[in-house]
Image (spheres, coloured by chain):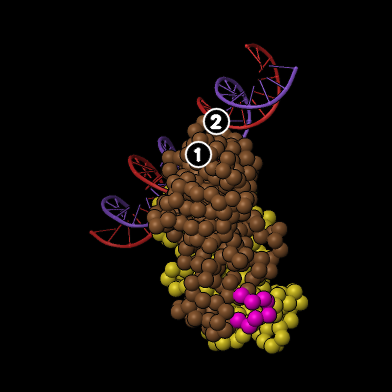
Chain colours: A brown, B yellow, C purple, D red
Amino acid sequence: MQRGRPFNRQDMNLSHSMEDYLEAIYNIKVRNQVARVKDISREMNVRMPSVTGALKALADKGLVIYQPYESVELTQAGLDHARGIAHRHTAVREFLTSVLGLPEEDVEQEACGLEHAISPETLDRLLKLVDFIGAHGDDKAFRLSDFQSFLKDGSDPDGDMSADVCYLPATIKSTRLSELCPGMKGRIAFVSGRKPIRKRLVEMGMTSDTHFEVLRTAPFGDPIEIKIRGYNLSLRRSEAEHVEVEVIND
Amino acid sequence: MQRGRPFNRQDMNLSHSMEDYLEAIYNIKVRNQVARVKDISREMNVRMPSVTGALKALADKGLVIYQPYESVELTQAGLDHARGIAHRHTAVREFLTSVLGLPEEDVEQEACGLEHAISPETLDRLLKLVDFIGAHGDDKAFRLSDFQSFLKDGSDPDGDMSADVCYLPATIKSTRLSELCPGMKGRIAFVSGRKPIRKRLVEMGMTSDTHFEVLRTAPFGDPIEIKIRGYNLSLRRSEAEHVEVEVIND
DNA sequence: TTCTTAAGTTAGTCTAGCCTAACTATAACG
DNA sequence: CGTTATAGTTAGGCTAGACTAACTTAAGAA
């Protein structure tokens, strides 16, 4: 029960609907680089004026940068939030398909509903469960008690998992280029930021879907050196913060 | 994504909020026999005028019988619906606690959010999963592939489950007295219906928390004979339909 | 039987989110 | 360089669902 509760998502109080908009913007940027009102309207199945309204609300909360007639940018906070939602979505979808065995097609819509109601704690355990169950193919035996003790102290009797593994299985782990450490590889999702900085980054070859590897980072992470399209490139931290990437661990 | 979708819960289109009200009424009746505006208001954490409004809306949809200044009754449809919601709620709570191992206290609120977004198909599988995993204590090995094939053809290699078991484990299976078959035992949850019929039933000993057993049912289920408080009682089907019970299988 | 009080209702307000209709900006093309 | 089509915005309206303030019922005490 418990009505009247504002949806408690960490500090920020985002409505169900605003979360949907944020997620849509994020997804569109990953696909198309830029998110325009029309795109969002299509993705969300609403009319354009509704999008305009939502963007103003999101801008008020400091989650997007919105200026009339321009394409939408995510702020740092907006990006963080959007990633959170996307992770919840992925976790739920993953659980529904790979554990419950529901068909991919049917799952998408349901995940959209469930993603808003999942607490961080549950999210964490859901991901761990998916990982634990699916760790080494469907035929590996699973004991609930093993999982429980794994949750507690991170021990897995079969030694296939460890507590500090990355719990995003068939999942995309997204972050900013500036967060990566040397040796990590990834794929560029999209470049955010206003026109001039975007232009510069794109000219350097930072375009969507391009793969790269981080070579070196200086003491304070500035500059950061990456290998991309066969070239070595050196970026300022302030620039790397505008590059949303997906980590690929091999 | 997919905004603009009316919450597709089977045929009836009930909003998130209306579902909450319905569930609250159901829970209160199970606890208190009667649900009054004040109770609902307390349970839902809203003010009384909001309840009045909601009751009118639910009455319009034919889910409750509402007359000003009187206590609320659930119609047949309302009861069915409420049970559905309660089951989703229980399934989610069960999963969160017994599989994910989250603490009881934290789970209640989250279940409230999730219960609205769960499809019948997912509900079914979630219950099966809880049952399958917990079938014989935490130490029983579980193979995802076994679960998957159990879902398909109802076969369990260890023979501990069968396809037509009742998939509500630590769960309350609630229904109407009129639905039960001879030999079934249960507990009276509450008696619905307007005053005269309620009065008669209560006088016969049909009060909340009383245990009973179904002895006989005539061809068309009318009358139905039960043993309650040491007496044998014969009820018309039309009366038994007003008695909400919880089945106890031993 | 009247009085008092708690429960319940009505009326009216507010906000979030959606909508349509009508206006405006931008960019692309002749 | 103006025209036009498309994208986007503003204005205004609607519904759901909450709220407060003020009125009404009903039930129990005097």
Residue at the (45%, 47%) spot, across then down: A236
Q: Three-letter amino acid code at disc 1?
A: Ile
Residue B92 at x, y percent in the picture: 55, 68
**Disc assigned to residue A197:** 1
Image quarter of the C terminus of chain A? bottom right
Residue at the (44%, 51%) spot, across then down: A223
**Residue A213 appears in the picture as rendered:** yes
| Magenta segment includes A140 | yes
Main SS of the magenta segment? loop
Q: Say if mark 1 contacts mark 2, CB within 8 Å.
A: no
Residue span colored magenta = A135-142
| Magenta segment includes B205 | no
**Disc assigned to residue A69:** 2
Q: Is residue B130 above or below residue B40?
A: below
Q: Quadrant of residue A199?
A: top right
Residue A108 at x, y percent in the picture: 65, 57
